[in-house]
Amino acid sequence: MYKYVGQSVKRVDGLDKVTGYAKYVDDLKMPGMLYAKIKTSPYAHARIIKVDTSKAEALEGVKAVITGKDVPNRVGLYLEDKTFLATDKVRFIGEPVAAVAAVTPEIAEEAVELIEVEYEELPAVFSAMDAIKHDAPLIHEDLGNYKYGSIFFPKPGTNISNHYKIRKGDIEKGFAEADYIMENEFYVPHIQHAPIENHSVIALTEPSGKVTVWSSCQSPYAVRKALSVAFNLPLNKIRVISPAVGGGFGGKAGTTLEGITIPLSQKCMGRPVKLTYTREEDMVCSFVRQGCLARIKTGVKKDGRIVAEENTFYWEGGAYTEYGVNITRAGGYASTGPYDIPNVKADSYCVYTNQPVGGPYRGFGMSEIHFAIEQNLDMVAAELGIDPVEFRKINAIKEGGHTVTGQQLFNVGITKCIEAVEKDIEWGKKEKPSGPNKVRGKGIACMYKAPSQPNNVASSALIKINEDGTANLLVTAMDIGQGSNTALAQIAAEVLTIPVEKISVVTGDTDVTPYEWQTVASRITYCAGNAVKKAAEDAKEQMLKLASIGLGLPAEYLELRDEYVVSKIYPDRKISIADLALGLTMPDGSGIHGPIIGRGSFIPPNVRNTDKETGQGEKPVAFWTFGAQAVDIEIDLETGQIEVLKVAAAYDVGKAINPQLCQAQIEGGIVQGLGSALLEHQIMNKGKVLNPNFVDYKIPAVRDVPEMIVRIIEVPEETGPYGARGVGEPAMVPTAPAIANAIYNALGIRINSLPLTAEKVLYAIKNNKSVSCKLVKNNKGEDGEGQVKCGIN
Amino acid sequence: MKHKISFTVNGEKVHMEVEANKTLLRMLREDLNLTGAKEGCGAGECGSCTVIVDGKAVNSCMMLAVEADGKDIITVEGLAKNGVLDPLQQSFINNAALQCGYCTPGMLMSAKALLMRNPNPSEDDIKEAIGGNLCRCTGYKVIVDAIKEAAGQIN
Amino acid sequence: MKKFQYVKPSTLDEVSDILLKYGDEARILNGGTDLLVRMRDKMITPGVVVDIKSVPELRELKYTKEEGLFIGAAVTMNEVICSDFVLERYRILAEAAHEVGSYQLRNRATVVGNVCNASPSGDTIAPLYVLSAKVKIFSKDGIRLVPIEEFILGVRKIALNPGEVVMGLQIPDIEGKSGGAYYKHSRRKDVDLATVGVAAFCNEGKWKIAYSAVAPTILRGHKAEELLNKLEKIDEETLIPAMDAAASEVSPISDVRASKEYRIDMVRIGLKRAVLAALEQYK
């Protein structure tokens, strides 16, 4: 049907990457470059009494030393609670306190050791439940004075920086109607993004005061905005360039270390200052995924319909929640998962703790809540004696059904996804274990996600048609690996009929490429894709108008075909795109119009705020993506080790602009999900990360990968370009709960916290200790059975 | 104190003076502009710094620059010859065996070293060769496929 | 890394002289896969780094009936793994070496380096214990051979006097039937430190067992050995007392990798798996 969209076009940036030519920030070398290093806090919570930088400044080769005094302005995407360097207090172990720029990295390291900081230790809190106690030490006493977006609800005088509520229907009535009520609790610990490229930034200040920043970042414009606020610089005096990015997964969204290099560069006028985090710094000092304690109370009818659900999420947001408050919100408005439940009460709390900074991580809260939701579903289904797949089919949102905010949905693909994985994993077929002392099990989990972005986020694109018929596509959507450069070029190619290889994608320079809010939220194909499509259509409209004049035919009778404007009826009446690129030349030699520049701007249509009290809203998000995964595992009963043999995944992506790259995202997501399920855990002791390196923070390697069957389902999203939705984050959300459910299927044992380590599994096997349903009561008021300890492992 | 060393890189003879406390990785990246090899961890755990020294894949962050003296080194920049991609490079592109590309040079060098010593590797051999190369994007399956395909082409 | 002096002697005498001259200030650079990590993390800051890879004797890997297997100090893990006579006669060692790090790492890391590091979880060390390896040490006063169990004194502590250089490992020839296996339990399949390791070796019916990652040094499993040597038939049932004995004779700690209880459990299972695997190799 389409020539370029829907084709598995090869990555446009592949050649640069396989030849080692692609330049990432740390690869960049500039004349006079200086090297920066940070000094970090050894305390989880302490007042800064004094910072003495004199010895560091005196060291030969040191060009600048800065402390919090040089970067006092609070910044933040959704809540302005952070400074780039600690000012009055330190709030987590690893918080940058000072920084040095020197002529070599070694001298910078030496200088950092010479900086003397005097602290007064303060009591600290390391879990959400401790932090919300009445007498908990306050981490942000000034919370009441911070600026924040109107859709957030911080509670000054507490450690709660956001409380998002859903009040749908009538929860009391719902539970009264239920035949059974169950309460369960789940915990997900902190994990790390671990992109293979560490955070890296270079800053250069010119005599005019203009600042140029090269940053490995997902969102050059967000960085520009944050720096503008932090340093009182007008936006046109800041230029942010993002070259190749070696993986982000959310950890390079917003800003992390950019603000540290600017004051250093301002003190070293004209000399670029480079700061590249070590792996240890990257794992602690940038962003982590927050921990989450989830409590779910479910009211269900005997026939399997969930009639009431109460979700309470406590997010361990870390020392600064400028970004985390929105993850809390996303968790709130997606709180029940992709199921149609008439009565819902949800409370999602973002809580400050003296731990590393929680930030956006692939899934933006969805992985955390679905670990709880999807296990909870299986637990409820088990009590009712209903098969987990059937149970999901009963409750999944159908065509015309409603979400937890009351939004009515059409073009809903969740049931198709369930059916696909049910078939691919051969649900119901009992598999043979590979030996004695081994058992097999299968599990399923679903998910949904919408881009968690402000309602009015904007994208834009520019297309310049060149006089030889090639084109330059300018966007600030960043290709962080997901393949956006390729997909966006395909969309432009489809409209313009210019082949993909003739379109050069230019990205990541706020002086040149037009505004893009951020490359996060699985939003680029949809948002930037729409902007690109509009820009291409704008260029097309200009070309048709000019061609109409040149050919003497009405524009409606013309179309673009194979790089020409052609008459629909008389194919020999045509003008090449190349000949129109700089305007139309008339027979008498004059010219009209001028260069063809296609402009496209896009804001998702009609996305509106939800009600402050009830969280209800008809269209609180741009679109939803649905998906499901089913897994087939084998457990070694003697060691507790889990081998994931097969994962079947199905996602409704609306329209796969590039099926090969779409599949690639899903495979990568499955493996990352597997990592969070079995291996990954930021182990902390009183706020100190004990495993900030690859020796003890293990991510999946090649032998950990199961057989993967990926199905791409296409139920078109009406507002998406060619029907496309997003898939980058959904790809990893269901893996962990599917594995947890498979463990139950194999052993009859529930493990309600991540990661599902061999040790936990063996302990559960040995002690036959499940943290299964606490059957509170059936509706006749009789005490339920099967009460087992319901706590956190 | 600087040490004089001589070695070949991607077929070219190089004479240099290096400080003892510089790793081979940093020398390649900073002094020779061969930025393909990356410092993902600096501790021999992620493999993104993999280069081939005297025919063997090594983590260049775990070697001192001075140890390059007398050695024959191949980096990712030396794979393509006269603008023609190595079958591995082409195969990585064909199979979408890369996304962000940061682990790709290291992966290619581990794979190249494998095919140099074993032109007909089994799937197990391939997984052994890249077991020390971490990738966060692809899920590895496509990388194994790409190496298999390249091996098939060479034969 | 802090600055240091790099020297590359070509004889054992020279190495010895440098070590005597600089004492604690000097460190040996062999494969470098441990030294460089510790220097990067600033856990050690030697003033002098002595690269021993140019000393020809240290690159030797040879087998003779009289002396058995000699692994020179600079012989890499991959060289050991690929060696025909190691695979033929000392397979347990090849298997254990294969568990160390990644392929790239094994092109540089050395077995002797693994021993001299004396980490509680070094994968090649437990097999060397059960193979009755001796450490061959050079000094100005001559060459001495020290049983490996006496060589490793504690975490990162070895019985080396000032000026002494480890030349290599001497492993006696094995007479008669034998079979050995190394069971390694780790969090991830590849490139991970051992949570627990068990080496089992049987020669003409006599068993030797050693455990790694469950004590400051590798531990010989005397209790388990005693019970194994009494067994007429070995299977999952009859092994249970020996498994219990293994669990009782180790004293692991809890750390970020595993708890003490889990390690003890894995030693129990590891003993069984190592013994059964050793029997499969028995010939």
Image (cartoon, coloured by chain):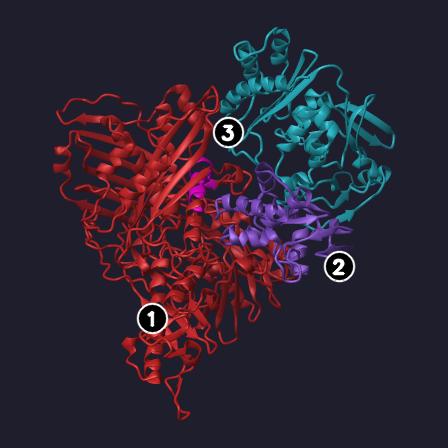
Chain colours: A red, B purple, C cyan
- Residue that numbered label 3 is attached to: C258
Q: Residue C16 or A57: which is nearer the viewer?
A: C16
- Where is A170 relative to A623, above or below? above
Q: How far is disc 3 from disc 2 in space, using C-alphas?
A: 48 Å
Residue type for callout 3: Ala
Find numbered disc 1 in the image and state the secondary structure of the residue it sits on.
helix
Please provide the residue range marked out in magenta. A668-688
Q: How far is disc 2 from disc 1 in space, using C-alphas?
A: 54 Å
Mark 2 vs mark 1: give the one in front.
Answer: 1
Q: Is residue A759 left or right of residue A135?
A: right
Q: Residue A420 or A767: which is nearer the viewer?
A: A420
- Residue that numbered label 2 is attached to: B14
Residue A292: percent from the left, percent from the top? 35, 40
Subunit under mark 1: A
Mark 3 vs mark 2: give the one in front.
Answer: 2
- Where is A45 relative to A383, above or below? below
Find numbered disc 2 in the image and state the secondary structure of the residue it sits on.
strand
Residue A10: percent from the left, percent from the top? 48, 57
Disc marking residue A537: 1
